[in-house]
Image (cartoon, rainbow, N blue to C red):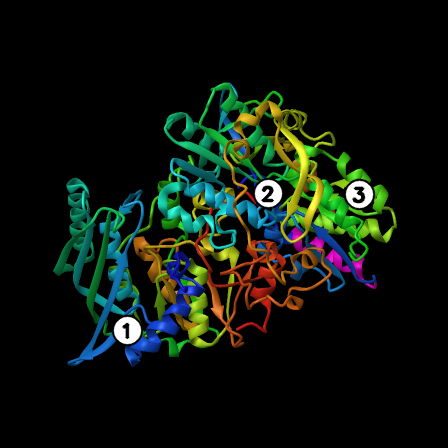
């Protein structure tokens, strides 16, 4: 009997196949088929962006955030990287019988604070309670509408060879903080999630030269670059020495055998920009607090075997595949 | 089977030591070491120090590598 | 990171790579085998194969203790996790290894499987939760075995009645000897495992070198270590002067770690062991010694009823020995792929088959 497994939800190959073979195959329409972070829909004179995301994170509270903050940022960021200013969010919660009221209050206050920081409002919502054990504590879904930026022309079809690839900051922070908080591995490190709204950051850099953006969440930078390579048809080449990673995140990864390239981020974006304006976009990013560690990490190539190549720290060459399942701490 | 990382000893308490590298710290067992001292680098694997890192030999190896013909 | 980044220097790596190209020029094709999962990972991670000339081949042998753990062990571990009152503790690596119907990862969500970084954490959990039976999955070669030995001694000192080990530990040299004397294997030497050697020293490799003429270089895990070691192996073979050399002298002492070896001897006894994809290798496994039998879960719980379905068509044994390529295995990329691995070579994300799957242009 065919079953859905955890690997189907980890952002990698199996999930992509499921989306293609089941959801797209049945729900097929031009908006969904684009598989963008948000759907861009003509509305009156401009375009509306519309997205949805569900949050099932464990633990609910972690250094740098909680499920409430994450549920706002996730949707705000999907809209922002699609080239839209987020305006209105919905919020649906499913809690298990016996869930702590104090925790629910903490989460709600967190949602409030994050909305304020992002300049958005929760305009409609839903709340359900299910039997103990039917959900793990609490699950949250948010959907959001945004208005396309005037200067936005985000489209996968605009990606061309020689376009530069920019990462807005250090990678792996969020996944590393969850790892420390979740599994009792008994390490001490000053690592916190980068969970945060990117819309005001995007607003400060948006221009026609930015051809595409995506936030590298589940599956990390490597998986997102694979998605971009597969969808655009072009190879991607990046350099390990250019990729910013915080010292302590890197150390934790070395110790546990994790690869920062495959670790989730919740406050970063990848931008594919025209070669001529790359340095200009980079300097605009660096002027904003969320982009101070931004780096140009590589470029789009003209070859079309849809692979992502990494020049390693020691000068070797490695092919970066899409993640297949979740990473686990290793001794081997 | 061998994923193990050099860590510096910051503090020793009996057969346990607090070690650190790159801003990440842990308390590990040092039962397998001969006369460990604060400041020593040790190879950490599965919560134990399995051997000391000879820093003089490390520098020597690096020098040889730099001068390889 | 100190004592790591210096050994990844791109300039020196390029220089050693050039020296390897020069040394190997005109040389007939030669294969070396690395027998350590961490070497397999490092070679892949730093893209080292692409820095080697065509005529120097590096084969991934059965070096990952997790991947050579037999299916039956996994099935029994899963069975233990289903028993009321038992919590199975394990290193993370073990969780994705497939058993007959399931894996430990699939059982994890029911809170009866927990990941730890150190076996001692499992024993300390047992100490604090006397109402639960804790079983630690003891997997690993000589690098890891001392840590479980120290943990069992701790459990004995604390008089724990609810802490057990399910030993799947193996020792490296018998497997290397088996590979070295295999008629079909065409390797000229071994890249010997760094941290296993830190424990066992150089002596166990003497026989592999003298009796079978294998070049042996104990290699660290950083790119400069691996490249230098390959250069040393090539030079040994070229000069027809094979011996055991220690490239990783900053950690490995010729005598090994006496304290660790004594502890392994005290807590464990040697037995025959089943290696996934290879079969039984005599005197290659470890079981808790009589003195520590109280901590052996197999003496405490009857697991003989657990039945395992054998892989038909799995060619891991030949792939591990470098005799066949993954493309010659009928299961490759059909019944056996990274999402549903059958044998050891695909279970490890950097095993020969998993690596082929990633690079092979033929796959979908």
Q: Are the residues tagged 2 and 1 within 8 Å (C-beta)?
A: no
Q: Is residue A127 magenta?
A: no
Residue at horizontal 52 percent and vertical 40 percent from the top: C303
**Which disc number belongs to residue C118?**
none
The chain ID associated with circle 2 is: B
Q: What segment carries the magenta color?
A: C12-26
Return the x and y of residue C181 as percentages of the image width and height.
80, 49
- Which residue is labeled 3 in the image? C208
- Which residue is labeled 1 in the image? A152
Q: How many marks do you count on the picture?
A: 3
**Which disc number belongs to residue B1?**
2
The chain ID associated with circle 1 is: A
Secondary structure beneath dot 3 equals: helix
The chain ID associated with circle 3 is: C
Q: Residue furthest front?
A: C305
- Which numbered mark, 2 or 1, is in the foreground of this view? 2
């Amino acid at each position: 009997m065919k079953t859905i497994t955890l690997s189907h939800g980890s952002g990698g190959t199996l999930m992509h196949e499921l989306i293609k073979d089941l959801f797209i195959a049945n729900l097929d329409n031009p908006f969904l088929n684009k598989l963008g972070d948000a759907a861009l829909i003509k509305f009156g004179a401009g375009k509306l962006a519309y997205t949805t995301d569900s949050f099932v994170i464990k633990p609910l509270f972690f250094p740098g955030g909680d499920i409430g903050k994450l549920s706002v940022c996730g949707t705000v960021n999907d809209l922002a990287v699609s080239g839209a200013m987020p305006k209105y969010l919905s919020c649906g919660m499913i809690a298990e019988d016996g869930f702590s009221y104090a925790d629910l209050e903490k989460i709600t206050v967190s949602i409030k604070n994050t909305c304020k920081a992002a300049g958005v409002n929760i305009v409609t919502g839903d709340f359900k309670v299910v039997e103990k054990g039917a959900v793990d504590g609490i699950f949250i879904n948010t959907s959001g509408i945004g208005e396309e930026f005037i200067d936005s022309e985000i489209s996968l079809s605009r990606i061309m060879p020689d376009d530069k690839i920019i990462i807005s900051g250090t990678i792996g922070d969020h996944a590393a903080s969850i790892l420390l908080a979740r599994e009792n591995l008994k390490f001490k490190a000053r690592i916190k999630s980068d969970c945060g709204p990117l819309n005001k950051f995007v607003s400060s850099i948006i221009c026609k030269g930015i051809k595409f953006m995506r936030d590298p969440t589940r599956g990390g930078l490597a998986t997102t670059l694979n998605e971009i390579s597969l969808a655009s048809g072009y190879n991607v080449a990046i350099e390990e020495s250019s990729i910013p990673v915080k010292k302590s995140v890197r150390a934790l990864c070395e110790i546990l055998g994790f690869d920062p390239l495959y670790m989730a981020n919740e406050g970063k974006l990848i931008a594919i920009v025209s070669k001529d304006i790359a340095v200009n976009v980079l300097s605009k990013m660096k002027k904003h607090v969320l982009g101070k560690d931004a780096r140009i990490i590589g470029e789009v190539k003209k070859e079309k075997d849809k692979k992502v190549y990494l020049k390693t720290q020691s000068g070797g060459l490695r092919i970066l595949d899409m993640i297949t399942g979740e990473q686990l701490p290793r001794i081997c | 089977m061998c994923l193990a990382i050099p860590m510096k000893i910051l503090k020793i308490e009996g057969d346990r030591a607090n070690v650190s590298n790159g801003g990440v710290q842990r308390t590990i067992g040092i039962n397998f070491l001969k006369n460990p001292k604060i400041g020593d680098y040790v190879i950490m694997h599965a919560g134990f120090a399995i051997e000391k890192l000879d820093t003089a030999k490390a520098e020597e190896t690096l020098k040889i590598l730099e001068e390889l013909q | 990171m100190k004592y790591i980044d210096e050994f990844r220097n791109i300039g020196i790596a390029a220089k050693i790579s050039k020296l390897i190209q020069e040394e190997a020029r005109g040389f007939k094709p030669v294969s070396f085998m690395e027998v350590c999962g961490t070497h397999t990972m490092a070679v892949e991670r730093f893209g080292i194969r692409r820095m080697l000339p065509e005529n120097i081949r590096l084969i991934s042998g059965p070096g990952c203790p997790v991947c050579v753990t037999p299916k039956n062990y996994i099935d029994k571990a899963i069975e233990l996790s289903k028993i009321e009152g038992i919590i199975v503790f394990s290193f993370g690596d073990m969780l994705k290894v497939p058993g007959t119907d399931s894996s430990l990862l699939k059982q994890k969500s029911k809170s009866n499987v927990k990941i730890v970084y150190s076996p001692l954490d499992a024993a300390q959990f047992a100490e604090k939760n006397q109402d639960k039976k804790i079983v630690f999955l003891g997997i690993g070669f000589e690098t890891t075995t001392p840590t479980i030995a120290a943990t069992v001694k701790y459990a004995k000192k604390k008089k724990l009645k609810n802490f057990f080990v399910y030993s799947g530990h193996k020792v490296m040299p018998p497997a290397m000897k088996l590979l070295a004397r295999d008629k079909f294997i065409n390797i000229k030497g071994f890249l010997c495992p760094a941290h296993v050697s830190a424990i066992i020293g150089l002596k166990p490799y003497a026989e592999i070198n003298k009796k079978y003429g294998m070049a042996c270089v104990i290699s660290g895990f950083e790119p400069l270590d691996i490249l230098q070691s390959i250069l040393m192996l090539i030079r040994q073979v070229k000069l027809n002067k094979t011996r055991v050399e220690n490239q990783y002298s900053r950690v490995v002492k010729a005598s090994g770690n006496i304290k660790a070896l004594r502890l392994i001897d005290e807590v464990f006894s040697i037995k025959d062991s089943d290696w996934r994809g290879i079969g039984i290798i005599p005197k290659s496994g470890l079981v808790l010694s009589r003195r520590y039998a109280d901590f052996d879960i197999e003496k405490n719980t009857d697991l003989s009823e657990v039945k395992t379905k054998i892989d038909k068509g799995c060619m891991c044994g030949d792939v591990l020995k470098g005799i066949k390529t993954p493309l010659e295995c009928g299961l490759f990329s059909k019944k056996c792929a990274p999402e549903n691995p059958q044998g050891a070579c695909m279970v490890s994300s950097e095993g020969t088959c998993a690596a082929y799957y990633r690079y092979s242009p033929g796959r979908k």
